[in-house]
């Protein structure tokens, strides 16, 4: 493994080469010998709280794909789309997305969503943040709703159901209500 881009005890570096050289030079000149105080921890905690801008601090419930609706530009729709599966790109799917109007969101627009110095699209865990005009997304959602309702109506007709009167051929209609289910106690 190439360790030239790693910094001590930090893993892969997201710094450019000039910043890495400056950092490595400063680390060799003055090794870190200071002990962090509880005050340092309190200051850092406050900085993290400010940077998170009122998000939930509990990291066990952190959603990697949450996008604050306030950062989405008016008239646009953001959506996470598949970028890779098991590390492999799917060019056919990428063409399908482009035909549907989806374009990658550049990390220059939302630098807080990517490591420092990143360029290109915003990608997380094999998913890419994409955008298209909200008008196009709304029309697509409407088509999906119509198709789903048609599929239910086809199944109801196949079962001999009639939505209007509640009974046909001695059968009840399909219940479309939501109600709590009683859980038997053992």
Image: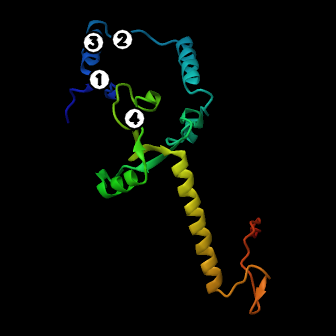
Between marks 4 and 1 in the image, the one whose residue lies nearer the viewer: 4
Q: CA distance from mark 1 to mark 3?
A: 12 Å
Determine whether label 3 and label 4 are within 8 Å by CB. no
Q: Quadrant of residue 57?
A: top right
Indicate which disc, 3 or 2, sits on the residue closer to the N terminus: 3
The one nearer the camera, 2 or 33, is 2
Q: Which mark is residue 7?
A: 1
Quadrant for the C terminus, please.
Answer: bottom right
Q: CA distance from mark 3 to mark 2?
A: 15 Å
Between marks 3 and 2 in the image, the one whose residue lies nearer the viewer: 3
Q: Secondary structure at mark 1?
A: strand
Determine whether label 1 and label 3 are within 8 Å by CB. no
The crowding category of the residue bearing disc 2, from other C-alpha atoms within 10 Å (few below 14, some 14 to 19, many at least 20), is few
Q: Is residue 100 above or below residue 11?
A: below
**Residue at 27%, 6% in the rendered image:** 29
Determine whether label 4 and label 2 are within 8 Å by CB. no
Residue denoted by label 3: 22
Residue denoted by label 4: 106
Q: Which mark is residue 147?
A: none
Residue denoted by label 2: 32
């Amino acid at each position: 493994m190439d360790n030239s881009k790693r910094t001590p005890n930090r893993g892969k570096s997201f710094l450019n080469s000039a910043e890495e050289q400056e950092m490595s030079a400063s680390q060799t000149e003055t090794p870190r010998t200071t002990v962090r105080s509880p005050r340092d921890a309190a200051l850092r905690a406050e900085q993290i709280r400010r940077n998170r801008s009122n998000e939930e601090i509990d990291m066990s419930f952190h959603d990697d794909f949450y996008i604050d609706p306030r950062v989405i530009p008016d008239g646009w729709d953001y959506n996470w789309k598949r970028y890779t599966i098991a590390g492999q790109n799917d060019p056919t799917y990428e063409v399908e997305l482009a035909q549907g109007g989806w374009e990658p969101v550049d990390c220059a627009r939302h630098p807080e969503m990517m490591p420092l110095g990143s360029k290109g699209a915003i990608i997380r865990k094999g998913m890419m943040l994409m955008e298209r005009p909200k008008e196009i997304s709304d029309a697509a959602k409407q088509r999906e709703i119509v198709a789903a309702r048609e599929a239910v109506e086809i199944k109801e007709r196949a079962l001999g159901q009639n939505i209007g009167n509640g009974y046909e051929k001695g059968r009840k209609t399909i219940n479309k209500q939501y109600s709590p289910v009683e859980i038997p106690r053992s």
